[in-house]
Amino acid sequence: MAGFKGGGMGNMQNLMKQAQKMQEQMQQADKELEDWEIVGTSGGGTEGDETVVVYMNAKKMINGIEFGSGLSGMVDLSDEDDVEMLEDLIMAAVNDGYKKADEVYKEKMGPFGNMGGLGGLM
């Protein structure tokens, strides 16, 4: 083939090294997401006065739920309205945690653009 000097192979190796480095960085960011603690809250008017607290990582895996002291004496589980209120508080705390987790995810995985969607091709 006229004009072929073999320079393409070096570029391909360079590209593969860059892809491998990016994959390692993505794996590190993914590990950080698993280890990151997110705290979602609801029901409290002031900090420390939360009625429901949800703990999760930045991959939205819930690790725990706590009910604050403000909830005691407030909920009667035999009262359908109280149960509905408690369900709403839990959902609000989970959604607060999800919102915070989304922000952390964007921060950590944003530099990789759509590369995270290649799923196993690298």
Image (cartoon, rainbow, N blue to C red):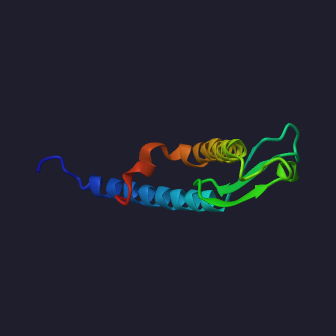
- As rendered, which of 84 and 14 lies closer to the eye? 84
- As rendered, which of 20 and 89 lies closer to the eye? 89
43 sits left or right of 103 in the view: right
Quadrant for the C terminus in the image: bottom left
Residue 27: where, in percent of width, then height?
Answer: 52, 61
Q: Which residue is drawn at 72% across and 53% down?
A: 77
Q: Which residue lies furthest to the left in this view?
A: 1
Q: Quadrant of residue 91?
A: top right
Q: Which residue is drawn at 88% across and 47% down?
A: 48
Residue 105: where, in percent of width, then height?
Answer: 59, 47
Vertical comparison of 72 with 114: above or below:
below
Q: Which residue is drawn at 83% across and 41% down?
A: 44
75 sits left or right of 23 in the view: right
Residue 75: where, in percent of width, then height?
Answer: 78, 49
Residue 107: where, in percent of width, then height?
Answer: 62, 44
- As rendered, which of 78 and 40 lies closer to the eye? 78
Count of numbered circles in the view: 0
User: Can the viewer see residue 37?
Assistant: no
Q: Residue at x 45, y 51 (%)?
A: 116
- As rendered, which of 34 and 3 lies closer to the eye? 34
User: Can the viewer see residue 104?
Assistant: yes
82 sits left or right of 46 in the view: left
Q: Residue furthest top?
A: 45
